[in-house]
Image (cartoon, rainbow, N blue to C red):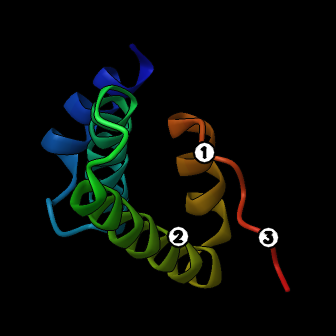
Amino acid sequence: MVKNSFISVSSQEKKEGSVEFQVFSFTNKIERLTSHLELHKKDYLSQRGLRKILGKRQRLLAYLSKKNRVRYKELISQLGIRETKTR
């Protein structure tokens, strides 16, 4: 429910190329693929796609955390994503 309100706000105020919008769309794809893989456990091509999308989202979040920590924290809390581990 929270995610739907975020998309309505972000689509009106922000561009589709913004980091927040991209992370949001990747999160939606990840949720969709995860539910698909719960039914189809041996769909290895979808597993590969899921891993690629997870990597893209992780790189975008790393970029955002370096550039603007406040926006990163807000996005993490809105989407309910765990914070990435730092090495």
Callout 3 touching callout 1 (CB < 8 Å): no
Residue on which the image places disc 1: 81
Check disc 3 and report its element: helix, strand or loop.
loop
Identify which residue, 46 or 52, lies in the foreground. 46
Identified by mark 3, the residue type is Lys
Q: Nearer the viewer, residue 38 or 79?
A: 38
- Which kind of residue does numbered mark 2 sit on? Leu
Crowd rating for badge 3 (residues with CA inside 10 Å; few <14, some 14–19, many 20+): few
Res 19 quadrant in image = bottom left
Task: Describe residue 6's horizontal placement relative to residue 67 as left or right.
Answer: left
Task: Classify mark 2: residues with Cα within 10 Å, few (<14), some (14-19) or many (20+).
Answer: many
Q: Residue at x 66, y 54 (%)?
A: 73
- Mark 1 lies on a secondary structure that is loop
Three-letter amino acid code at disc 1?
Ile
Q: Secondary structure at mark 2?
A: helix
Task: Mark 2 and mark 1 in contact? Answer it, CB < 8 Å.
Answer: yes
The residue beneath circle 3 is: 85
For residue 26, the mark is none
